[in-house]
Amino acid sequence: MTTPGRYPEAIVSMPRSGIRVVMDLAWELGDVLHLEVGEPDFPTPDPVVEAAVAAARGGFTKYTPNTGILPLREALVDKLARVNGITTTPDRIIVTLGAVAALACTFLAAVPTGCDVLLPDPGWPNYAMQLHLMDARPIYYPLRTENGFEPDLDELAALLTPRTRALLVNSPSNPIGSVWRPDTVRAIVEFALRHDLVLISDEVYERIVFEGEHVSPATFAPPDAPIVSVYSFSKTYAMTGWRVGYAVAPPPLNEMIARLQEPTVSCGCSISQAAALAALVLDPRVVEAMVSAYRERRDVAYAVLSGRGVRAFRSQGAFYMWIDISRGGRGSYDFARSLIAQTRVAVAPGAAFGPGSDGWIRISLANSLEAIETGCTRIADFLGR
Ligand code: PLP
């Protein structure tokens, strides 16, 4: 216990991620099928590792510019044009310690204390944790199954207040695995611009798409519109531990995000930036092979669950499956705790992703086909009891 007032209240009172709660339980029990963890199970591709080794041996071990090395930002300009259809310049790109740092700095740069940010429910729990630390308020907009897990603009409009400063979107989505249709993305961009909001687009799963097409919101707006697009090397290239992400933002947001680097981290890791450069020129088949593996696992998970009458969203992207547990009539934390205790399958409780998501759980497809098949069978058995 901390003495009240002795340490910053925002940190003392920050809720833990609900996924961590299950992970701790899983480690305690041992012998558990880990379907709760959201990181690729593939090793980082060899050419990337080799580039890092060469960089370290070659003495590329010093501080880099605050916003990242220029060759990487130049290569990212090319990637953004090629993959995302975004025309930009190196000074608008800030290389960060993973997308998580890009998002934290974007919130800090764009959202004054006491303002509101619209977040998806369900959505990645770290957004709310970050806002909590800076005394900004998350306002959740629901992604409902009956709308194909896409936002309803009237509902969004009803949530606006004079304090609403930003709107966060995340497609392909963690935890749902939905990929928003291009028309929806365009409508969201128009909505944000009409209401003078900063649009923050978390696109870390941009390359993991099974159906549909990932469209970057920034392609629907003029280059100086207040849109911050956030990307990562973590998921696409199985590089979670290397900590390389980046934000793309117009002035003045780019300068504000860049300014935050010096007092917080100085710069990203030099060796990881050399590795990231190598990732950008990898044979595309390396990424395609990982995406096909996730797709195959998605198919198996969906076949097992739907074959047993369990309702789940057939993911269109990312590497998750969002499973309806509401018929069991118990909350998702209670469900996850009992499931792990009785069947040794760890899943992420829906309530960890937003206040309206308690009737769901998320499983990760970043595990072997066998583990996914066994895990889904046990979930279906458990729900049927
Ligand atoms: N955004 C979403 C939706 C995520 O799921 C994650 C990681 O799980 C991140 C951002 C952060 O990724 P990074 O490893 O680049 O910090």
Image (cartoon, rainbow, N blue to C red):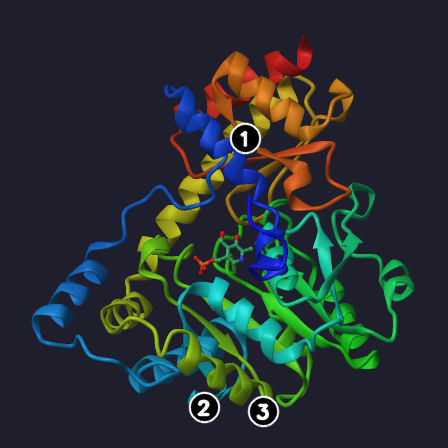
Quadrant of the image containing the N terminus:
top right
Q: Percent from the top left, x then y, of residue 82?
A: 46, 76
Q: Nearer the viewer, residue 112 or 191?
A: 112
Spatial CA distance of label 1 from label 3 is 41 Å
Q: Which residue is mark 3?
A: 251
Q: Which residue is mark 1?
A: 347
Identity, as a three-letter code, of the amino acid under mark 2: Asp
Residue 379 quadrant: top right
Q: Nearer the viewer, residue 236 or 52?
A: 52
Q: Residue at x 27, y 52 (%)?
A: 44
Crowd band around label 1 with a 10 angstrom C-alpha radius: few (<14), some (14–19), many (20+): many
Q: Residue at x 58, y 23 (%)?
A: 337
Spatial CA distance of label 3 from label 2 is 9 Å
In the visual, does 49 lie left or right of 167? left
Q: Which residue is mark 2?
A: 91
Specify whether residue 228 is in view.
yes
Q: Secondary structure at mark 1?
A: loop
